[in-house]
Image (spheres, helix red, strand yellow):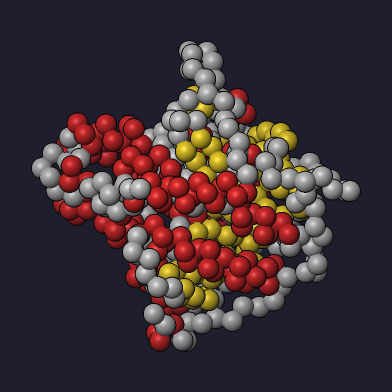
Amino acid sequence: MPAPTRLLAAAVAVAACVGAQAVPAGAATASGPVVSRGVRIPAFYTPPTTLPAQNGALVRSEPLPLALSLPGLKGPLPGRATRVMYRSTDSTGRPVAVTGAYIEPAAAWKGGGPRPLVAVAPGTMGQGDQCAASLGLQYPLLFNGRTVSVGYETLVVYRLLARGIAVVITDYAGLGATDRLHTYVNRVDEAHAVLDAARAVRSLGGASVTGASRVGLFGYSQGGGATAAAAELQPSYAPDVTLAGTYSGAPPADLAAVMEAIDGGDLAGALGWSVNGFLQSEPALKPIVDKHLNAAGKAALDDLSTMCVGDALLAYNSARSTAWTTDGRPLGDIVRAEPALGTFLEEQRIGTMKPSGPVRVATGVNDDLVPHGQSRELAVAWCRKGADVTYEPVVLPGAGRGLLNHFAPLLADQGNAVSWLSDRLAGRPAASTCATLPTQP
């Protein structure tokens, strides 16, 4: 079995263990539903033409059937889910509709005080609307012969619910919502989407969380970058959302370093998602990108714009950007040679501001997909700014594949990360490890 097929098979096997469901296919029509790779996107995900004036305002909601749910005496287990759409603001200052899901836990919160809330920022799901994390709660394994998506965030969501912690998970701008392309790894868009998700559920009928509830953030990989950026931007963007704690796992804090690491690797398709997202956020970059991309590169960007992670693993595993450029240079070299591209990537850097509240940064020491070094440097930068940082190097043997080196630390450390965040939500202080960080790998 080829390596990319083995990787995908492993991911599918995990999802199969927790449940799978087919998603109906259909053909797009001028007036019909949006269809992405044969998957009908529910009408709920089409934003209205006018949005509320306030960030975090609820646009609409509807019940969300969880694929993995059991009947209970007081309602479904592990909780009752609601699909949500809310208003946020993108990096250009324009209003944007963002979708996601809220789950009211069946379990009681025993940590003292009102029930807390954790906003979960998903890891890389892809760029097609069918890849949205809220749909992943309904369809843990999406497969129709044209697309494959695995709702792997379900595990941490259910771990939090079992502790009586309410959860809201964002789909990010443009992932799920059908009016624009997902602005993959745009730190401002992602941070705003996370913070506004926490705001939105306060006005949701049936939700037990209120403005007095402690709020935590949880994210790994793309999600780790989103929560890290949210912790930095919270004081200026969402001062009403006080953060009790933020978990940032394997954060892509330096996109230039990450782009070079994934080029030619297991998740090379993420290069296309990054460029697509940059162009969505900053259309002025398009002439520069067009100048350097050949026909194969432009076709790859278009193809990837509707793909999920599973699709990219099959179609673009080990792809090299040198095959996409007019002169055979890798995208990293082109970014360094084009000041506008370099400036845009530098604006995405995380670690230039002090985060709000205690933060826990975890990174696998052998992670070569989202390089360990640049994630560790984020913790160093925050410590230098006087932040309350818990740094956790996850020491595991190298697995020989970038994707495994990246995801093994997530699974190995997730229980500890949930416990750390639960302690912050219960009001227990964190113990900073900044003093010992220089001795840590």
Question: Viewed as shown, does residue 57 lie left or right of 267?
Answer: right
Q: Quadrant of residue 212?
A: bottom right
In this orientation, which residue lies closer to the viewer: 121 or 316? 316
Whether residue 139 is visible, yes or no, is yes
Vertical position of residue 416 compared to residue 288: above or below: below
Answer above or below: position of 58 versus 158: above
Percent coordinates x, y for residue 46 in the rendering: 56, 27
Query: Who is closer to the viewer here, 404 or 175?
Result: 404
Name the residue rendered at 31%, 43% in the picture: 316
Q: Residue at position x 35%, y 48% from top?
A: 1
In the drawing, does residue 140 fall left or right of residue 73? left
Where residue 174 appears, x then y in whole percent? 48, 37
- Viewer-proximal residue, 324 or 251? 324
Side of 288 relative to 64 (left or right):
left
Q: Residue at x 82, y 45 (%)?
A: 71
How many numbered circles does the render carry?
Answer: 0
- Work out which residue is located at the far right of the displayed protein and give it: 73
Q: In the image, 317: left or right of 25?
A: left
Answer with the quarter of the image where residue 366 lies: bottom left
